[in-house]
Amino acid sequence: MRFNDEFPQKGKVLFSAKGKKFEVAHIGHGNVMNQILDYVHGYLFSANALLDQLEESKEYSTKENIQHHLDLYAMPIIFMYRQYFELSLKQIYLEYSDTSFAEQEEMIKNTQHNLIKAFEYTKPIIASVLENSEKQYLDAFENYIKQFHSYDEKSFNFRYPYDKKLNLIFNNKKINLYNLKERMNEIEEFLCHIMPLLDIKRSNNSMNKSRDNAIKLWKENKLQEAVNEYLEALNKKQFVVGEKHIDVLIGNAEIGIIYLEKKQLKEAFEHLKKAENIYKDIKSFIPAINFNISRVFNYIGLIFEIERKYENAIEYYTKSFNAPCVDIMQTLIAYRGIADVYEYQGNKEKVIEYLNKVIVICEENYGIEHEETIQAKKKLEIFINTDN
């Protein structure tokens, strides 16, 4: 019989969603970026797997058979490496460029399958996260792109053995597939180094936008909305840099201040104390830290003052004017806070002492005719006269 059941059969389907365990592949799951990433690595890993299989077969195959399979697999292996290269460049642009969907569509249209054109879009994105000492690797990466482009400008040379006029594309061309595999793995290592840096940059940009929105809402007196926006930004930041970071310190401090304006003392105190604790942890290994921690101390002092925990209030106001990087304004706030606390306690001597400190600072920094100086002297005079 000339035909048998191994030939194509009427009624059978090529693509079925049914099968035994580990027979059915899942294609098209996840969003666009997830699917692109699957395609990118699918091509790379498939090409590598073919070469690994050939390497393993050397133990039991003849030289002729090994060479036959090298020649047989060469075109699909190189084609898959090229697909990996092209899709990697496009993935970086689509995922990390701050562009509109229309601009991304235009990029795909303009580049088509041209590696060099795709790299022109991607290069500044990669360069933006590299140190000067790392730019040499970007140069080498670009050189690999140019080499691959010279072999296959339009992504057709390893799809077909001939062009549209039936002219053979290659004639006795020799390519070391294992050398190519090593170079492609170097590319993958380079991109694996780049991706986390791009993720961090994107995350920072997102956090900065969230913080800017929070500050805008804060200025508009939309305090709860500001808190919500700021908390989201803070969570993103902590996820990337951890809790012991200057930006997390600042975030907690500013959230605490907003809560204080909302008269939510418990929440305000919680975030301000977090800021203080972070400062304690990082000040020893960041000696040049440029953050006015005295501001945080003053706000904690104010909370204690409001709660009539006067000794704690004095402790934090004192911490404030003794803190590094303290400025004139925070020193004045601390002295005035201590004067207020001693007034509540009925300690006339101490009130006069700290109001005089305020006057001295005002005269030295603003002059005797400045409004701050005049108001400080007036307050002292009223206190003395009222006390009498």
Image (cartoon, helix red, strand yellow):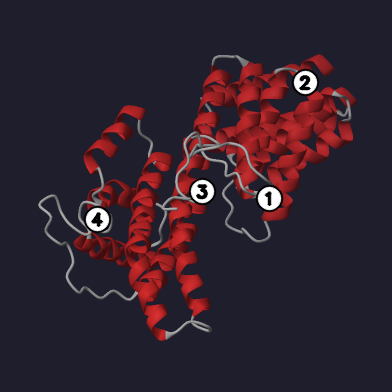
Q: Is mark 4 on a helix, strand or loop?
A: loop
Looking at numbered disc 1 in the image, what kind of residue is underneath it?
Answer: Lys
Q: Which amino acid does label 2 sit on?
A: Gln
Q: Residue 5 carries which label?
A: 3
User: Circle 2 sits on which residue?
Assistant: 264
Specify whether 371 is left or right of 89.
Answer: right
Quarter of the rendering containing residue 237: top right
Res 378 → quadrant: top right
Measure the C-alpha gap from mark 3 to mark 2: 79 Å
Q: Which amino acid does label 4 sit on?
A: Tyr
Disc 3 residue crowd, few under 14, some 14–19, many 20+, Cα 10 Å:
few
Q: Residue at x 63, y 30 (%)?
A: 232
> Mark 1 packing: few (<14 Cα in 10 Å), some, or many (20+)?
some
Q: Is residue 331 visible?
A: no
Mark 4 = which residue? 160
Q: Nearer the viewer, mark 1 or mark 4?
A: 4
